[in-house]
Image (spheres, coloured by chain):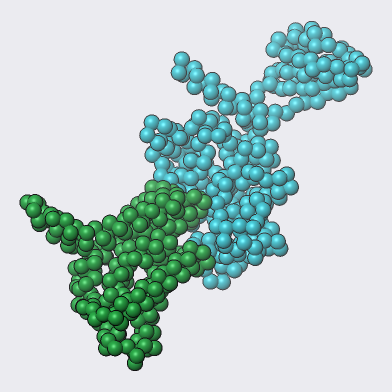
Amino acid sequence: MPKPAATPPVPPPAIEVENLCKRYGAVTAIEGVSLKVNRGEIVGFLGPNGAGKSTTMRIISGLMPATSGVARVNGIPVAWRPEEAKRHLGYMPENNPLPEDLRVTEYLRLRARLKGVHGRDLNDSVGEVMEACDLVRKARRRLIGTLSKGFRQRVGIADALLGAPDAIILDEPTIGLDPHQILSIRRLINNLRGKMAVLISSHILAEIEQVCDRVIIINQSRVVASGTPDSLRREFIPDATFSLCAATTATALETLLLPAEPKTEVTDKGPEAPDSAFRRLTLRVPADSPIAPVLLGKIWAAFPGKIREFHSLKANLEDIFIAATRRSWELETKIKN
Amino acid sequence: MRTLRILLLHELRSLAIAAPTYIAAGLFLSMMGFLYLMVLHEAKDTPLDLTPVQMYFSLFFVPLFLIVPLLTMRSFADEYRNGTLAALFSTPVRPAQVVFAKFASAYIFYLLLWALALLYPLVAWWMLGPLYSDPRLLDLPALIGGGVFVAASGAFYVAVGILASSLTRSTLVAALLTVCALFFLVLLGFALRFVPLDTFAWGETVLQISDYFNTVGHLGVYLRGIADSQPLFLFLSGTLLSLALASLAVESKT
């Protein structure tokens, strides 16, 4: 009987965190945080200030011990084998502290050596990350202290990329940057997709939505949501919302739709222009309601020629973030009461 | 070992481009030059028990309070303030390696400055030898003994400076802590000799302990050209203890 073909071993996730807790005396910074970032995946890590994002990232990077729980990088437990784990991880801390008195190349060469890149690989590795971060032309020989915020962020990201780690952690990489700089950093992070795992925290939610494959939301020290933006949208924003501009009123629309869907909500946002008969209205029905897919047809049939505009309003990450954090606060209040 | 070498070279470079290093060097060499000049002037007029070299070394603690804080105060305090230490520890580097690299670089500069200061007696002997009445102008045993003592004690004092810097984010506080600690270590044992402790039952024990820490007393032995292992043990253990405590402080602060 032929032997069954041996299945190749499944590589461990690039970053894996299980039940991570960090307490400072009576204060709990994070509680039971679990997350996973697979190879080649870009994951956004969101949360209000003080939610525990940076603490989690610092623990994964081996800068801080956890009170309990396990953080693994490439399957290597950070607490027990920190040096080995750090070889597989690049980290750009919040505010990106850099030595002012070193030139960009000197700094990157030093960091590369500390990360175990030596000999012929040293020049190649430094050259590659400088190229990837667009530092070669303008910043190569400049002192870090004289660089603009955008270039400093690039140096931080270049440093994280040195040594071709399996995963990189970027803590607020776009903080304080202008729109052009944000765009170039976004492009840079996008280029990393498929090459390495990226865990990125940011307050700019539109940024995360455009760049990340998956989002993890942390609030009050706990993970409150995790998934793709679409799955989170389904979970936290259960209603379908539409905007229309029509020569009718909210009451007329409600009279039309309420018999078919009792949960319909219509909001009148006023006339389109001061003397116009057309009004801007927002319609909200449950996403799984049978009338949702045929809404336009139904309204058009009732008010022929009186609709100028109709489109679906897709909840953005900001809405999801607010809904997820609000739900966790409500849950917390319920438990306390 | 490779990581340590990389860190050491980086620290040496950082010290070499830092203004406080040159301020320390300038002040130290001017002060030592001035002290040696005073010693020569004194020895020229009145015959002394001590040779000029012995007198020169017996004042070694005067510039110590200046040079050690200036060389060590920025080591960790600056890095804490700028947050660069956290970035450093995101690479496979241990706190003990960073502490040792910072210590070694400051100590190398300390030795270099003292090596330059030891040139004064040699230059004086070469240039003034024929004109000078005292044949003991170049006291070689005292020069070698004093040099060994300064090198051994310097390791301890620089390590204390590194420890002080590892405890605070402020370079000023680090410098003040270093000065206080050095004052305590260098002069306390010597000062206690003038306190009538032997009138108390426990006084003798205190004096024996203070004798062990009496740096000035140990220096006297070395200046006679005698190599005593007791202070070497004190300096070595003090150095290791200070560096170990600094490592713990750095680990807890990042």
Q: Nearer the viewer, residue A41 or B88?
A: B88
Residue at screen point 61% across, 67% down: A124
The picture places residue A304, in percent across and down from the top left corner, at 91, 15
Residue at x-position 64% and y-position 29%: A320
Point out the residue furthest to the left here.
B201
In which quarter of the view is residue A127 placed?
bottom right
Q: Position of residue B46 (x, y in %)?
A: 26, 80
Q: Nearer the viewer, residue B22 or B232?
A: B22
Image hue for chain B = green
Position of residue B201 relative to residue B109, above or below, is: above
Pinpoint residue A251: horizontal percent, then vertical percent: 80, 8
In which image quadrant can residue A136 be found? bottom right
Point out residue A10 in the picture as x, y percentages from the top left corner: 51, 49
Relative to B44, residue B1 above or below:
above
Chain ID for cyan? A
Residue A155 seen in the figure = yes
User: Is residue A29 found left or right of A309 in the rendered image?
Assistant: left
